[in-house]
Image (cartoon, grey):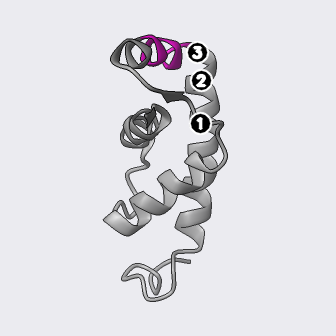
Amino acid sequence: MKNLLEDFVAQEYERLKPPAFCGCAQCRDDVIVFALNRLPPKYVAANVGEVIGNVALHRDQPIADASVVLVEAFRRVGSSPRPGHAGAASSG
């Protein structure tokens, strides 16, 4: 069993990541988790389901939905990094 959105959101993260965004593993994970918690999961159980599901995810609406949530995640994580984050002192 697999949530197809995990790989899809990670790909969209790389495509949409702003140049000025930290991008360290912690910030990357925070953005992806933020997005995954706000998008409905797309679970599949077999390889055929994964292929069909991936085709469905690469349509306009799922891409738009993920993009909107990721942009919000970049804004939130960028403006409020976790305490102790190396970039926290330089955020402003």
Mark 3 vs 2: CB contact within 8 A: yes
Look at the numbered discs 2 and 1 and tell me whether their residues touch, using CB distance below 8 Å: no
User: In the image, residue 52 lies at what x, y percent?
Assistant: 45, 10
- Total marks shown come to 3
Mark 2 or 1, nearer chain start: 1
* Residues at marks 2 and 1, CA–CA distance in whole angstroms: 11 Å
As helix, strand or loop, the secondary structure at mark 2 comes to: helix
Vertical relation: 41 (above or below) 33: above
- Please give the residue where the numbered disc 3 appears in the rendered image: 60
| Circle 2 crowding by C-alpha within 10 Å: few under 14, some 14–19, many from 20 | some
Q: Amino acid at mark 1?
A: Pro
Please give the residue where the numbered disc 1 appears in the rendered image.
41
**Mark nearer the viewer, 2 or 1:** 1
Look at the numbered disc 1 and give the secondary structure of its residue. loop
Q: Residue under circle 2? A: 62
Query: Which element type, helix, strand or loop, lies under badge 3?
Result: helix
Disc 3 residue type? Asp
Q: Is residue 53 magenta-colored?
A: yes
Q: Earlier in the sequence, mark 3 or mark 1?
A: 1
**Label 2 sits on what residue type?**
Pro
**Residue ID at (64%, 39%):** 39
The magenta stretch is 52-59
